[in-house]
Image: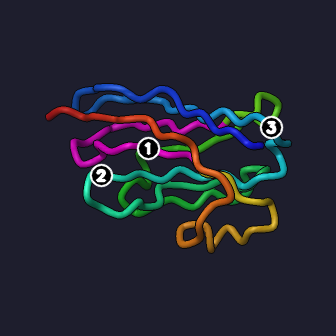
Amino acid sequence: QVQLVESGGGLVQAGGSLRLSCAMSGRTFSRYAMAWFRQAPGKEREFVAAATWSEGITPYADSVKGRFTISRDNAKNTMYLQMNSLKPEDSDVYYCAAYQAYTSIQNIPYQKPDYWGQGTQVTVSS
């Protein structure tokens, strides 16, 4: 059974940075495309960024382009989200997601993943 465990969330001031991590166990990490989503209370979960197994393709939501960077270390079975220039509107619970490698990267923002993590809270104060 796949487990995804996020870490790295917390409280930061506007303009600051955080790095989220998502560690996978139970399966071969490199066989999965990975993604980050976020969700605010009462709102739908929204796509943030994704990465194919080789990081050859890394789409981002328009709201985070130029500020967030997704990466992955297949040797460590871990995905990262470096978040810079954080804004109060980035305050959400951030979830990592895993998709079978054959999943089209273009579909990831709209497709339910094969596995979700439990989420990590990010709070940006103004």
Question: Looking at the image, which is closer to me, 32 or 106?
Answer: 32
Question: In this picture, which residue range is highlighted in magenta?
Answer: 79-96
Looking at the image, residue 100 sits to the left or right of residue 113; the answer is right
Q: Residue at x 80, y 60 (%)?
A: 101
Spatial CA span between label 2 and label 3:
29 Å
| Quadrant of the frame with the N terminus | top right
Q: Residue at x 37, y 29 (%)?
A: 17
| Quadrant of the frame with the C terminus | top left
Q: In the displayed structure, would residue 63 be above or below residue 108?
A: above
Q: Earlier in the sequence, mark 2 or mark 3?
A: 3
Q: Earlier in the sequence, mark 3 or mark 1?
A: 3
Where does the image place residue 125, in percent across and percent down from the top left? 18, 32
Q: Residue at x 25, y 42 (%)?
A: 87
Spatial CA span between label 3 and label 1:
21 Å
User: Is the residue marked by circle 3 packed among few (<14), some (14-19), or many (20+) residues within 10 Å?
Assistant: few
Q: Amino acid at mark 2?
A: Ala
| Marker disc for residue 12 | none
Label 1 belongs to which residue?
94
Q: In the displayed structure, would residue 121 be above or below residue 58?
A: above
Where disc 3 sits, the SS reads loop
Badges 3 and 1: C-beta atoms under 8 Å apart?
no
Spatial CA span between label 2 and label 1:
9 Å
Label 2 belongs to which residue?
40
Q: Amino acid at mark 3?
A: Gly
Outermost residue toward the left in this view: 126
